[in-house]
């Protein structure tokens, strides 16, 4: 037996017990006549003590030979520490070692295995297995397990069935790019890895499974933006005989349960906001509502004056930055430069200082008097001491710019408290989205999303205005999930395909098996999919997902630890009847 | 709201309640003046009643229009049935319908949605979503969910952490064939889908995760034998600071827990048998021990007589078939033909009838007298009324043949009771296996399996005799899992590679990142992987896995429902820089 206890569980109550421990030598402190080793395993750290008086010479010398990250096993007796460390749970005791066994040596690790380590990002990815030994990463993986366990148990209690859907499926040219898998048994043909189990979960509803869930890997071959992974994990759910309200309540319950069971935080009923309201108030469909700074629309009170920039703008819109009047000129200049970066793309910003004496001082004092500015303050809800920042331009662009600036300001002003959780539902998404490139509408969610039934007639006259029974779950400014009620009626489905510009033949080719299934009694159904990687990160108070994934890939889709992807040998290519184009 | 109750929960205690139900019209019985519809959902069936007296004419006619598998919603009042059906839980009540709403129509399904359906295998696969509506399939999927939930909760309680390992990994030419995934971002390079997360779980142990599990899809591009799937699900586990005993106890506990919690069956400690014992007693390393018929070795008592077939055989071995003397001559002939089939490959069989009067009658009476046959009976443990069947030939072949015959006999004699569970451990597998083709030894499990430390010196002199710390879990004649203690010492690992015929460079090329990791303090560790698909099937009393998988593939690796794999279009191929060989 390698151990009687782990390195995290020993306390004063174990005094005088003989124990066996195994673990890694985290560090030694050698005082010449006395030597301490911190022994670490997953569960904690215990202090080992050796000294000239009480340890044999052989043992003492062996202890001195132990290097960082050596794997050792010891036997010894629990004794009380003379100088206690109350910062760690085992800090009142130490183990007087009587036997020491080196289980494995270690080269000096390329970075220290400490909470605050010295390694760079790339080195840590290459030696990910060592990075995982560090508490911050290890705890994130344990946290992820807790979250997924709670999710499974919650949904299981509600009678959801975890059904595994296939990974080797069929490629569809619509939507994002598939990863494909050449078939050897069916030469010249390919499987695709699922971007989501969407069609399978709908087929399970046709199959009467009633409530389905799965925590499942999905794959998308897209150029990777920062913090996007080619493989990611989805909490995928579908329910039958439900309307939108049933789904929102069920999954609101899930998030409330997670916050309570994992963070011990109580949240009330989630606010709901339509897509239009969110766009209008916050300029985006995943607003962070932990803080205010709602949009104030200023066209009325800023146009038809001398200021041509505003006069010619489609939209003039501002936000009030709380206590922003404290900003120095330099800080304001920095924000001006920030919005002018190509990623944001504004031409500049207009600001109004709201002085403590009730007066205003703006960057456009030439064009606007105190009364004008006081109207702006009303529209943006600005008080004395605040700073109003105003952008102008095309509606879509200016909303996106101001929304980005709002988040940047909140970040810098510490208004985005990671220990505060502000979930909300965004509902009533548009059904269709106009695509300039193909000059046609395409489905904002997917072609099986149900339109609001009372707006169906608008499909003919103003398709862009039809709203869908589609919803997103937003948490702290991140979309953590989305879904919709699906179309189960074949006539509405045909109408949708028509408006999406599919001929009957095209629709059949791409969605044939699902449409076929829908001929045999599809129940009303709908669902949702939540991104597990991001949900876990946010619940843990972070936004970057990478460290919540045991072995993530880098931004080129590479695993630098195992060196994947890599070349195949000729035999493998021949068996698949594949050749590579123009590659040596 | 589509329903106030489901179709399986209404009882006499709900009498006079107004309820709303939704579901599928399973069947109607039309008596002219009265009409019943069985309404089905996942949870059960409720009987709806309409009649000329109590239903409006409009409602009554609408009810008559409902076809099989129409999706309907009804409102009505619970009344007591006049003729009760006590075979179903809802059989004491029926619902007098007041409102009927057709939610969706259905074409006549290609086979009946009944427990005993009329559809052929291929049709059912094509319309799998309809097959899933049938109780037998639906219940298997629900059962699978129960098993996987119990597994997760059990392991979670034991402090195992569920860690997701990547699906896009690196191809290794060793072992079975990988499915590969061309990379678009790294043209000319490929990912591979994991055959198992073996290396990642070992890296997690190096990373200090201590106890890992995952229920995970694995992929193997092999020619499919019956009941093999290209993608299958594994319960993958690994533990640190453990020896073989710790692992056997932990997973014995898991199986005991599953049998108790799911089947309410108590099993005692599992028997253990070495590989050698199993091969000797049963001729195979996954014996079904629900019944006897252990091998009796007859060389001593059958050779050096006049019967040349036995004299020239390397091994003469028999089993005693309980009550086998009742077999007719024709039945024995059938078994003779059965063992002569090419799949078995025996030349014939010798039999001995053990008569009730203590005499013997054999097919080789010309060569053996009653005393000889009485010795055979002793060796095979045959009693009066039994039949001894004897095969002869080369050791490896004759054991396999007799083992197959033993199972066939047991099957026909109903000795393989699917409600009886006889798990056992097979231990001490050989470390190495001689491969005739490559004329070298290769690892029986994998190259990281630890040899028995006290047999390491045999590696030089007689490598085939060295045993490994490797074990299989066998249940009712099926291998449901296997694993080993891994090598964590780099010198032993180097020795292993040498004996496997790897040069240092080859070893580095193929296992470099794992060997690298092992330089930084790998703990002693080991693990196991269980096949979930088969475990679930066996626990449910079946051996075929197909119906425990929601959407299985056929023997050509095709999903006939969605028609995968399929051709890619030119754009997709070009983006991947791939061309197809010689395919139109």
Image (tube, coloured by chain):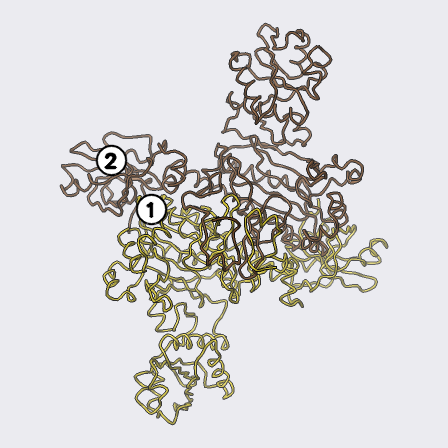
Chain colours: A yellow, B brown
Q: Badge 2, how many Cα within 10 Å: few under 14, some, many 20+? A: some
Q: On the same chain: label 2 and label 1?
A: no
Residue A153, position as x, y percentages in the image: 47, 49
- Chain under numbered label 1: A
Residue B51, position as x, y percentages in the image: 17, 36
Residue B159 visible somewhere in the drawing: no
Image side of residue B359 versus residue A436, left or right: right
- Chain under numbered label 2: B
Q: Residue at x 13, y 41 (%)?
A: B57
Q: Which residue is mark 2?
A: B28
Image side of residue B57 versus residue B234, left or right: left
| Residue B521 location, quadrant | bottom right
Q: Which residue is mark 1?
A: A516
- Looking at this view, is A517 or B42 the one in front? A517
Image side of residue B112 versus residue A229, left or right: left
**From the viewer's perspective, is residue B168 above or below residue B357?**
below
Residue A581, position as x, y percentages in the image: 55, 58
- Looking at this view, is A417 or B198 the one in front? B198
Q: Quadrant of the N terminus of chain A?
A: top right
For the residues marked 2 and 1, what is the alpha-carbon distance in whole angstroms?
24 Å
* Element carrying mark 2: strand
Image side of residue B15 versus residue B445, left or right: left
**From the viewer's perspective, is residue B583 above or below residue B38?**
below
Residue A215, position as x, y percentages in the image: 48, 52
């Amino acid at each position: 037996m390698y151990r009687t206890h782990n390195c995290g569980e020993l306390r004063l109550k174990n005094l005088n017990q003989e124990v066996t421990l195994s673990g890694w030598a985290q560090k030694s402190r050698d005082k010449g006549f006395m030597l301490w080793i911190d022994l670490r395993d997953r569960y904690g750290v215990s202090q080992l003590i050796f000294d000239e008086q009480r340890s044999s010479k052989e043992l003492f010398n062996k202890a001195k030979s132990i290097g960082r990250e050596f794997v050792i096993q010891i036997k010894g007796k629990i004794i009380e520490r003379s100088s206690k460390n109350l910062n760690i749970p085992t800090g009142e005791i130490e183990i007087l070692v009587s036997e020491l066994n080196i289980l494995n040596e270690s080269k000096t690790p390329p970075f220290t295995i400490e909470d605050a380590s010295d390694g760079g990002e790339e080195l840590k990815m290459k030696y990910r297995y060592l990075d995982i030994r560090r508490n911050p990463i290890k705890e994130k993986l344990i946290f992820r397990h807790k979250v997924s366990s709670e999710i499974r148990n919650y949904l299981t209690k509600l009678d959801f069935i975890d059904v595994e859907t296939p990974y080797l499926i069929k490629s569809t040219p619509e939507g994002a790019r598939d990863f494909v898998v050449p078939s050897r048994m069916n030469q010249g043909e390919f499987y695709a890895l699922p971007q989501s189990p969407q069609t399978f979960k709908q087929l399970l509803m046709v199959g009467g499974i009633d409530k389905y869930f799965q925590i499942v890997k999905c794959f998308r071959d897209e150029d990777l933006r920062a913090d996007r992974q080619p493989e990611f994990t989805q909490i995928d759910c579908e329910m039958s005989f439900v309307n939108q309200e049933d789904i929102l309540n069920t999954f609101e319950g899930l998030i409330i349960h997670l916050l309570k069971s994992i963070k011990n935080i109580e949240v009330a009923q989630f606010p709901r906001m339509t897509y239009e309201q969110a766009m209008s108030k916050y300029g985006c469909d995943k607003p962070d509502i932990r803080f205010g700074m709602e949009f104030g629309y200023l066209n009325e009170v800023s146009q038809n004056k001398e200021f041509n920039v505003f006069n010619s703008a489609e939209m003039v819109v501002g936000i009030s930055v709380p206590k922003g009047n404290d900003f120095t000129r330099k800080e304001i200049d920095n924000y001006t430069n920030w919005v002018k970066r190509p990623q944001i793309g504004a031409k500049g910003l207009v600001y109004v200082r709201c002085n403590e004496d009730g007066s205003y001082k703006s960057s456009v004092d030439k064009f606007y008097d105190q009364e004008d500015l006081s109207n702006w303050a009303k529209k943006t809800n600005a008080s004395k001491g605040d700073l109003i920042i105003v952008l102008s331009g095309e509606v879509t662009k200016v909303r996106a710019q101001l929304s980005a600036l709002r988040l940047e300001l909140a970040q810098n002003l510490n208004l985005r408290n990671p220990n505060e959780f502000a979930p909300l539902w965004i509902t009533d998404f548009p059904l269709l989205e106009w695509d300039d490139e193909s000059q046609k509408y395409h489905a904002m969610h997917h072609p099986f999303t149900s339109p609001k039934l009372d707006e169906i007639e608008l499909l003919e006259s103003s398709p862009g205005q039809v709203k869908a029974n589609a919803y997103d779950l937003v948490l702290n400014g991140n979309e953590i999930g989305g879904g919709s009620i699906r179309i189960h009626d074949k006539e509405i489905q045909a109408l949708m395909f028509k408006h999406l510009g599919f001929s009957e033949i095209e629709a059949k080719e791409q969605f044939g098996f699902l449409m076929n299934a829908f001929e045999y009694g599809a129940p009303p159904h709908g669902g949702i999919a939540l991104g597990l990687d991001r949900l876990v990160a946010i619940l843990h108070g972070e936004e970057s997902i990478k460290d919540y994934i045991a072995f993530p890939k880098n931004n080129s889709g590479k695993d630098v630890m195992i060196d994947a992807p890599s070349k195949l040998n000729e035999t493998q290519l021949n068996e698949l009847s594949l050749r590579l184009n123009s590659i040596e």
